[in-house]
Image: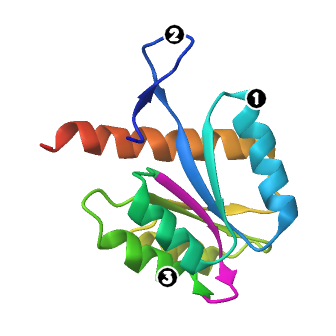
C-alpha cells in the first residue's frame, strides 16, 4: 500500500498517513481522535523496534515520535528513516519545551518538535505540513 492515497470522499487530495511512536497511551488516544476526525490513516508503535518494522513494511510519510523510548530515542528512528528510499518526515514529541531540542532536531534533518500532551490544532497543523512536505518531495523525485 502506498502512503499516497486519494481521499475516498473526494478522490482528489492525498490522504494523510502517519506513524506515532510513543510509550504513552494518552498520546495514542489523542492522535487517534484527530486522525479519525479527518479520515486520516494512523499507524501506532510503542518503541523503536515496532516502528522500524512498520516503516519497512509501509510507506509512511510522517513519523511522530516521543523523544525517549524504552529501546532508543528519536535519533535512532531518524537514522532508520534516512536509510529508506523516501525517508519520512520526523516530528519529535516532548513533554517539556526545549529550544535546544528544536535546533538539534532541525540540524539532524527532522521536521519539527511538538509539545505533549498534544493540542489537537497544533497536531493537525504539524502533521498536515509534514505530510505535504513529504508529498511535494515525492512528487519531485522520479520513482
Residue located farthest toward the top when viewing the structure as drawn: 10
Residue displayed at 51% across by 10% down: 10
Mark 3 or mark 2, which has the lower sequence index? 2
Q: In the image, which residues are magenta?
A: 62-71
Mark 1 and mark 2 in contact? Answer it, CB < 8 Å. Answer: no
Q: Circle 2 sits in a helix, a strand or a loop, which is it?
A: loop
Q: Circle 1 sits in a helix, a strand or a loop, which is it?
A: helix
- Find residue 134 and report its horizontal and vertical position in percent: 37, 46
Residue located farthest toward the bottom when viewing the structure as drawn: 71
Q: Circle 3 sits in a helix, a strand or a loop, which is it?
A: helix
Residue 34: quarter of image: top right
Q: How crowded is mark 3: few (under 14 residues within 10 Å), some or many (20 or more)?
A: some
Q: Name the residue under label 3.
A: 75
Mark 3 and mark 2 in contact? Answer it, CB < 8 Å. Answer: no
In the rendered view, tell whether residue 123 sits above or below residue 83. Answer: above
Image quadrant containing the C terminus: top left
Of badges 1 and 3, nearer the viewer stands 1
Mark identifier at residue 37:
1
* Magenta-colored stretch includes residue 52: no
Mark 1 or mark 3, which has the lower sequence index? 1
Label the magenta part by its dominant secondary structure.
Answer: strand
> For the residues marked 1 and 3, what is the alpha-carbon distance in whole angstroms?
30 Å
Residue displayed at 45% across by 66% down: 110
Q: Mark 2 points at which residue?
A: 10
Amino acid at each position: 500500500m502506498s502512503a499516497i492515497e486519494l481521499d475516498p470522499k473526494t478522490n482528489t487530495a492525498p490522504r494523510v498517513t502517519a506513524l506515532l511512536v510513543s510509550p504513552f497511551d494518552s498520546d495514542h488516544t489523542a492522535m487517534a481522535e484527530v486522525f479519525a476526525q479527518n479520515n486520516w490513516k494512523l499507524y501506532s508503535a510503542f518503541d523503536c523496534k515496532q516502528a522500524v518494522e512498520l516503516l519497512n513494511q509501509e510507506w509512511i510519510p510522517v513519523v511522530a515520535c516521543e523523544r525517549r523510548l524504552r529501546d532508543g530515542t528519536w535519533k535512532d528512528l531518524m537514522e532508520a528513516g534516512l536509510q529508506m528510499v523516501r525517508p519520512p518526515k520526523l516530528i519529535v514529541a516532548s513533554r517539556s519545551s526545549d529550544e535546544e531540542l528544536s535546533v538539534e532536531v532541525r540540524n539532524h534533518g527532522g521536521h519539527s518538535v511538538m509539545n505533549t500532551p498534544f493540542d489537537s490544532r497544533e497536531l493537525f497543523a504539524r502533521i498536515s505540513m509534514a505530510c505535504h512536505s513529504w508529498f511535494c518531495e515525492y512528487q519531485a523525485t522520479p520513482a
